[in-house]
């Protein structure tokens, strides 16, 4: 236990130290919001991967594989493949727009202050919804490996991340997240090498545990599967904390190169959580009955290797990686929320406004995480993806590729599609959908109907309000799509 505590403390101090180094380079508002648009593709790709691979990736995917088998590999497949959609449809044009935040893009493309305010509300909601499971995961990790109270892990992450974001903004967070990606990958890969050797030495025992539900057979949850795929694949391009990082690239070509590197880094990482879940079926099948499947990554080294110095060191390394996951993702989320709060709610985007907004951005999800400690980490993250896919994904795809989009159409689509997804989230978080039947399926995995609804409403209302197409839309579309070499 002492090694584990030391590892977690070391990660926290390293995060603060790297953030302090970034603070020396952060002086202007542009530094705080978009790191002065000077982050190279490789560095930015590591930072994006660091913030994207969250509690759901580090703990939740392995827990789902332990509980439900290989069918839930749709989660990591969707999480990784989402960057392909982002590469094809969004990355380059979004960077060429010159915006600082998603609300900035809304006003630039559609010229509506009301739409900007609506986008701000959704950025804040998605950010806080996604921050809650990061703090939950931190509380679970510290409680599992040290016996500390659940609230302590939540508070540690909230304090460390809020301090880093408030003091250094995007410039400091970039350094932190790039470091934490490689730490997370190492924390899973090194113990996995020992675990596979143990499994080999035990003559490759068959995977135990409960039988997996076959989602793709006629009696399985086919609707839930396709809804999950849609949420994860399209939700990535609507996540504010991911999109804001593309504003930090020097130009659109760099943003596309960044996305290609991210695909490789994220795909490499997701090899390991699935292996932890599979080996958990051999060495820790009892976690399913206890309802503690999210702890399989943390407990597997000790259970498989049977204690001793090597087992303790590997457990400490895994715990350090888990905390790095919570810290890095929370940093990105808090930066995106603080950015829109500082420019659209609490002030005019000055450095002082950003720091005030960062404190608010950290306090609210901390309170929520302390109130809803029993939620499944991956389920909450999946719901955040569903909201993003039902709101910002249609807005970005149509706003970038269809000149006929109008502000009333965009607002109606976000309100109806995104609002329906938000309603499903609130029902699930506050009490859960009714067990069984179509109501449960529609509320538990809403993306399959809320995403098409958002697109349909956005297109239909835009066609009905053709007279509201913004003036100068041709110049804006040229700005989004003209090659960087032709830009003045």
Image (cartoon, rainbow, N blue to C red):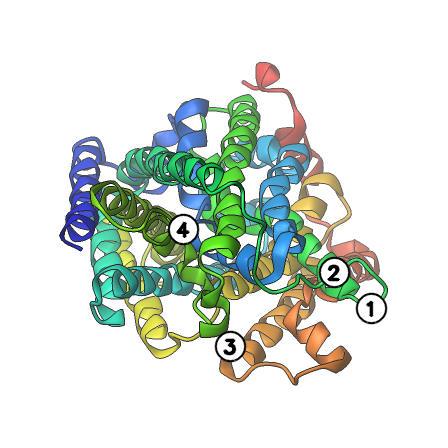
Q: Which mark is residue 214?
A: 2
- Residue tagged by mark 3? 429
- Residue tagged by mark 4? 336
Residue occupying the point 57% across, 62% down: 209
Comparing 383 with 485, the one in front is 383
Q: Position of residue 129 (x, y in %)?
A: 46, 65
- Residue tagged by mark 1? 219
Upstream in the sequence, badge 2 or badge 4?
2
Q: Position of residue 153 (x, y in %)?
A: 25, 63
Q: Are marks 2 and 4 in contact (CB under 8 Å)?
A: no
Which quadrant of the structure image shows residue 337?
bottom left
Upstream in the sequence, badge 3 or badge 1?
1
Query: Is residue 71 left or right of 278 when viewed as pictured?
Result: right
- Total marks placed: 4
Q: Are marks 3 and 4 in contact (CB under 8 Å)?
A: no
Comparing 189 with 393, the one in front is 189
Q: Position of residue 89 (x, y in %)?
A: 68, 37
Upstream in the sequence, badge 4 or badge 1?
1
Q: Position of residue 86 (x, y in %)?
A: 62, 39
Query: Is residue 180 left or right of 286 when viewed as pictured?
Result: left
């Amino acid at each position: 236990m002492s090694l584990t505590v030391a590892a977690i403390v070391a990660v926290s101090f390293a995060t603060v130290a790297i953030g302090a180094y970034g603070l020396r380079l952060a002086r202007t508002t542009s530094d705080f919001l978009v790191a002065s648009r000077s982050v190279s593709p490789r560095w930015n790709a590591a930072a994006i991967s660091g913030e994207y691979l969250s509690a759901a990736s580090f703990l939740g995917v392995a827990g789902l594989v332990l509980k439900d088998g290989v069918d839930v590999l749709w989660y990591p497949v969707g999480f990784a493949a989402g960057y392909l959609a982002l590469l094809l449809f969004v990355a380059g044009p979004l960077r060429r727009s010159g915006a600082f935040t998603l609300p900035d893009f809304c006003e630039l493309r559609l010229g509506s202050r009301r739409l900007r305010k609506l986008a701000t509300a959704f950025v804040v909601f998605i950010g806080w919804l996604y921050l809650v499971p990061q703090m939950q995961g931190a509380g679970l990790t510290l409680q599992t490996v040290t016996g500390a109270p659940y609230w302590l892990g939540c508070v540690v992450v909230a304090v460390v991340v809020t301090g880093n974001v408030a003091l250094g903004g995007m410039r400091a967070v970039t350094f932190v997240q790039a470091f934490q990606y490689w730490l997370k990958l190492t924390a899973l890969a090194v113990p996995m090498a020992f675990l596979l050797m143990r499994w080999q030495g035990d003559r490759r025992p068959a995977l135990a545990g409960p039988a997996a539900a076959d989602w793709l057979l006629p009696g399985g949850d086919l609707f839930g599967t396709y809804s999950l795929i849609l949420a994860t694949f399209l939700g990535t391009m609507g996540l504010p904390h991911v999109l804001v990082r593309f504003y930090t690239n020097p130009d659109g070509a760099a943003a596309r190169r960044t996305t290609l590197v991210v695909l490789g880094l994220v795909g490499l990482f997701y090899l390991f959580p699935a292996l932890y879940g599979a080996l958990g079926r051999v060495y820790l099948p009892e976690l399913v009955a206890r309802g503690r499947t999210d702890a399989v990554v943390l407990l597997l080294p000790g259970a498989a290797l049977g204690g001793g110095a090597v087992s303790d060191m590997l457990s400490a390394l895994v715990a350090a990686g888990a905390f790095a996951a919570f810290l890095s993702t929370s940093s990105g989320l808090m930066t995106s929320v603080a950015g829109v709060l500082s420019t659209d709610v609490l002030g005019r985007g000055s450095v002082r406004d950003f720091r005030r907004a960062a404190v608010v951005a950290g306090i609210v999800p901390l309170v929520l995480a302390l109130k809803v400690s029993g939620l499944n980490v991956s389920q909450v993250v999946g719901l955040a993806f569903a909201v993003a896919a039902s709101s910002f994904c249609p807005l970005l795809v149509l706003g970038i590729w269809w000149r006929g989009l109008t502000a009333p159409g965009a607002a109606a689509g976000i309100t109806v599609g995104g609002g329906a997804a938000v309603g499903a989230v609130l029902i699930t978080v506050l009490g859960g959908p009714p067990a069984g039947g179509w109501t449960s399926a529609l509320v538990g995995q809403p993306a399959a109907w809320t995403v098409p609804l958002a697109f349909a409403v956005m297109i239909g209302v835009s066609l009905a309000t053709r007279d509201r197409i913004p003036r100068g839309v041709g110049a804006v579309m040229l700005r989004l799509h003209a090659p960087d070499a032709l830009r003045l």
